Amino acid sequence: MKVCLTVAMVSAILVSSVGVAQAAEKTAQQQKMTQCNQHATSQNLKGDARKSFMSECLKKESKMSGMTPQQMKMKSCNTEAGDKKLSGDARKTFMSTCLKKA
Protein backbone atom coordinates (compact mmCIF):
# COMPACT_ATOMS: atom_id res chain seq x y z
CA MET A 1 0.00 0.00 0.00
CA LYS A 2 2.78 2.45 0.91
CA VAL A 3 4.65 1.59 -2.29
CA CYS A 4 1.56 2.24 -4.39
CA LEU A 5 0.99 5.59 -2.65
CA THR A 6 4.65 6.56 -3.10
CA VAL A 7 4.55 5.68 -6.80
CA ALA A 8 1.39 7.75 -7.25
CA MET A 9 2.94 10.77 -5.52
CA VAL A 10 6.17 10.55 -7.55
CA SER A 11 4.13 10.24 -10.75
CA ALA A 12 2.09 13.30 -9.86
CA ILE A 13 5.23 15.33 -9.14
CA LEU A 14 6.82 14.30 -12.44
CA VAL A 15 3.71 15.14 -14.44
CA SER A 16 3.37 18.56 -12.81
CA SER A 17 7.06 19.40 -13.37
CA VAL A 18 6.78 18.48 -17.07
CA GLY A 19 3.75 20.75 -17.38
CA VAL A 20 5.64 23.65 -15.77
CA ALA A 21 8.62 23.13 -18.09
CA GLN A 22 6.37 23.18 -21.16
CA ALA A 23 4.60 26.31 -19.95
CA ALA A 24 7.96 28.09 -19.51
CA GLU A 25 8.99 27.46 -23.13
CA LYS A 26 7.70 30.13 -25.48
CA THR A 27 6.33 29.42 -28.91
CA ALA A 28 7.95 31.05 -31.94
CA GLN A 29 5.12 33.60 -32.10
CA GLN A 30 5.49 34.44 -28.41
CA GLN A 31 9.24 34.93 -28.88
CA LYS A 32 8.60 37.18 -31.89
CA MET A 33 6.05 39.19 -29.88
CA THR A 34 8.55 39.64 -27.06
CA GLN A 35 11.29 40.72 -29.46
CA CYS A 36 9.04 43.16 -31.35
CA ASN A 37 7.77 44.59 -28.06
CA GLN A 38 11.36 45.15 -26.85
CA HIS A 39 12.23 46.91 -30.12
CA ALA A 40 9.18 49.16 -29.89
CA THR A 41 10.03 50.01 -26.28
CA SER A 42 13.66 50.78 -27.13
CA GLN A 43 12.43 53.26 -29.75
CA ASN A 44 9.99 54.87 -27.28
CA LEU A 45 7.08 54.31 -29.66
CA LYS A 46 3.62 55.22 -28.40
CA GLY A 47 0.06 55.17 -29.73
CA ASP A 48 -0.51 54.69 -33.44
CA ALA A 49 3.22 54.60 -34.22
CA ARG A 50 3.64 51.65 -31.84
CA LYS A 51 0.58 49.87 -33.25
CA SER A 52 1.78 50.15 -36.83
CA PHE A 53 5.32 49.14 -35.85
CA MET A 54 4.07 46.08 -33.97
CA SER A 55 1.78 45.12 -36.83
CA GLU A 56 4.64 45.29 -39.34
CA CYS A 57 7.09 43.54 -37.03
CA LEU A 58 4.72 40.66 -36.29
CA LYS A 59 3.91 39.92 -39.93
CA LYS A 60 5.09 36.49 -40.98
CA GLU A 61 7.28 37.78 -43.80
CA SER A 62 8.61 40.72 -41.80
CA LYS A 63 12.37 41.20 -41.87
CA MET A 64 12.15 43.59 -38.93
CA SER A 65 11.93 40.88 -36.29
CA GLY A 66 15.49 39.78 -37.11
CA MET A 67 16.92 43.27 -36.65
CA THR A 68 18.67 44.60 -33.59
CA PRO A 69 17.09 47.60 -31.83
CA GLN A 70 19.81 49.87 -33.29
CA GLN A 71 19.13 48.62 -36.83
CA MET A 72 15.43 49.21 -36.35
CA LYS A 73 16.05 52.70 -35.02
CA MET A 74 18.30 53.43 -38.02
CA LYS A 75 15.58 52.21 -40.37
CA SER A 76 12.87 54.34 -38.76
CA CYS A 77 15.10 57.46 -38.68
CA ASN A 78 16.09 56.88 -42.30
CA THR A 79 12.44 56.55 -43.33
CA GLU A 80 11.54 59.72 -41.44
CA ALA A 81 14.40 61.61 -43.10
CA GLY A 82 13.20 60.37 -46.49
CA ASP A 83 9.65 61.48 -45.74
CA LYS A 84 10.99 64.95 -44.93
CA LYS A 85 13.03 64.88 -48.18
CA LEU A 86 16.22 65.80 -46.33
CA SER A 87 19.61 65.60 -48.05
CA GLY A 88 23.22 66.57 -47.46
CA ASP A 89 24.14 68.21 -44.17
CA ALA A 90 20.49 68.59 -43.11
CA ARG A 91 20.03 64.81 -43.43
CA LYS A 92 23.26 64.09 -41.51
CA THR A 93 22.23 66.42 -38.70
CA PHE A 94 18.73 64.96 -38.55
CA MET A 95 20.02 61.37 -38.54
CA SER A 96 22.52 62.16 -35.80
CA THR A 97 19.83 63.75 -33.62
CA CYS A 98 17.29 61.02 -34.34
CA LEU A 99 19.70 58.19 -33.53
CA LYS A 100 20.76 59.81 -30.24
CA LYS A 101 17.19 59.91 -28.93
CA ALA A 102 16.73 57.48 -26.05
Image (spheres, rainbow, N blue to C red):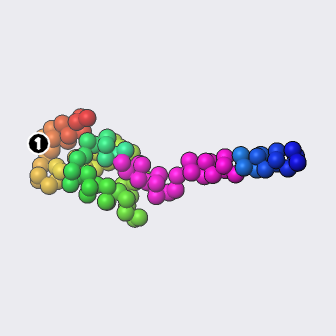
Q: Quadrant of the C terminus?
A: top left
| Camera-side residue of 72 and 10 | 10
**Magenta region includes residue 36:** yes
Name the main secondary structure of what is drawn in magenta. helix
The magenta stretch is 15-37
The answer to whether 90 is drawn above or below residue 47 in the figure is above
Location of residue 62 by image quarter: bottom left
Instruction: Please indicate, yes or no, whether residue 79 appears anywhere in the rendered image.
Output: no
Q: Which residue is mark 1?
A: 90
Counting every numbered tag in the picture gives 1
Q: Position of residue 13 (x, y in %)?
A: 71, 46
Could you say whether the residue bearing mark 1 is in a helix, strand or loop? helix
**Label 1 is placed on what type of residue?**
Ala
Residues 7 and 63: in front is: 7
Q: Residues within 10 Å of mark 1 (few under 14, many from 20)?
A: few
Q: Residue at x 28, y 43 (%)?
A: 43
Residue sitting at x 46%, y 54%: 30
Q: Is residue 34 left or right of residue 6?
A: left
The percent coordinates of residue 98 (x first, y second) are: 20, 40
Closest to the observer, 45 or 77 = 45
Viewed as shown, does residue 14 lie left or right of 60? right
Residue projecting furthest to the bottom: 61
The image quadrant of residue 59 is bottom left
Give x and y (percent) for residue 42.
31, 40
For image coordinates 85% across by 50% down, the residue present is: 4
Decide whether residue 55 is among the magenta residues. Answer: no
